[in-house]
Image: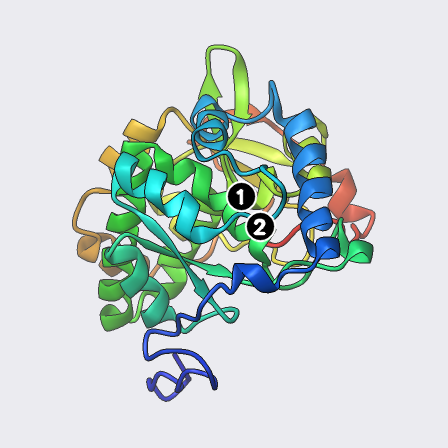
Amino acid sequence: MSADGFTPSPPPGARADWTIDQSWETYSRAEHDVWITLYDRQTAMLQGRACDAFLQGLDALDLHRSGIPDFGRINEELQRLTGWSVVAVPGLVPDDVFFDHLANRRFPAGQFIRKPDELDYLQEPDIFHDVFGHVPMLTDPTFADYMQAYGRGGQRALDLGRLANLARLYWYTVEFGLMRTDAGLRIYGAGIVSSRAESLFALDDPSPNRIGFDLERVMRTPYRIDDFQQAYVVIDSIQTLQEVTLQDFAPIYQRLEGADDIGIAEILPGDTVFTRGTQAYARAGGRLASTPG
């Protein structure tokens, strides 16, 4: 939404809900090859790094085939599994439009794919980030319900003027979340699984903090949009995440009105600490190397 509270009109060619046709038949061979390159590179490294739900979702949707997935094809299986579908949009959409899609079990995905010289970093999320990164997790019934609840929560957050707090929840879970498993920490956040460099950094690098999930703490913590994260938040399970967030956030928002933000790299006395990071990467100045979320 714009600063004055009005939603901008859809761009030319887009419907009232900002959706467009994917026009799968118009992708070039070069564009399909970019998808295949990214897909092969990521799947080769995500074994033993991504959580089971993500890897199972990749298998269920068969996102490789001969290149960029046709939304019509993958939606048949996604609808069967969890009642979700993927809809094409021309790029980033207004907040209220985004939340309405999620609340109705539709995931808006960019239609375009990055250029061959942009494999490692892209400012605006493309179809690889949106579909490879996000959609496999939507095959998990519990995560699918969480995403729908988030969409409904977003609609209310807009009314209450607390969107900044709710956006942090999305960032530290859906985009850059880690999960504790018996085999160790695993990735489920789309911004990590769709980025080769951040897939390595998030689990292996000594620089970032890795702390346990606490809802109010997450809502008080800003995040990096331009580089690797200085902190990653670890959930115990998708089920636990859903249970913690299925509550009325209004009392939380009221408490947060007088609360200061927590520093991105700060560790609080009550935090569950999996890794106390050195923050060496951030102190050295970082670099633009991660796929955005």
Image-based side of 251 in relation to 122, left or right: left
- Tell me the SS state at disc 2: helix
Q: Residue at x 36, y 65 (%)?
A: 98
Give residue 18's quadrant in the image.
Answer: bottom left
Q: Judge the density around disc 1: few (<14), some (14-19), many (≥20) Cα neighbours within 10 Å.
A: many
- Numbered mark located on residue 129 in the image: 2
Image-based side of 89 in relation to 113, left or right: left
Q: Name, please, the residue furthest toward the top.
A: 182
How is the structure coloured here? rainbow
- Numbered mark located on residue 123 in the image: none
State the count of labels: 2
Image quadrant where one finds the N terminus: bottom left
Relative to 160, say whether 132 is above or below.
Answer: above
Image-based side of 107 in relation to 248, left or right: right
Residue 80, image x, y percentages:
27, 37
Relative to 227, say whether 280 is above or below.
Answer: above
Residue 121, image x, y percentages:
73, 54
**What amino acid is labelled 1 in the image?**
Gly
Q: Nearer the viewer, residue 279 or 190?
A: 190
Q: Residue at x 51, y 55 (%)?
A: 222
- Tell me the SS state at disc 1: helix
**What amino acid is labelled 2 in the image?**
His
Q: CA distance from mark 2 to mark 1?
A: 5 Å
Identify residue for label 1: 133
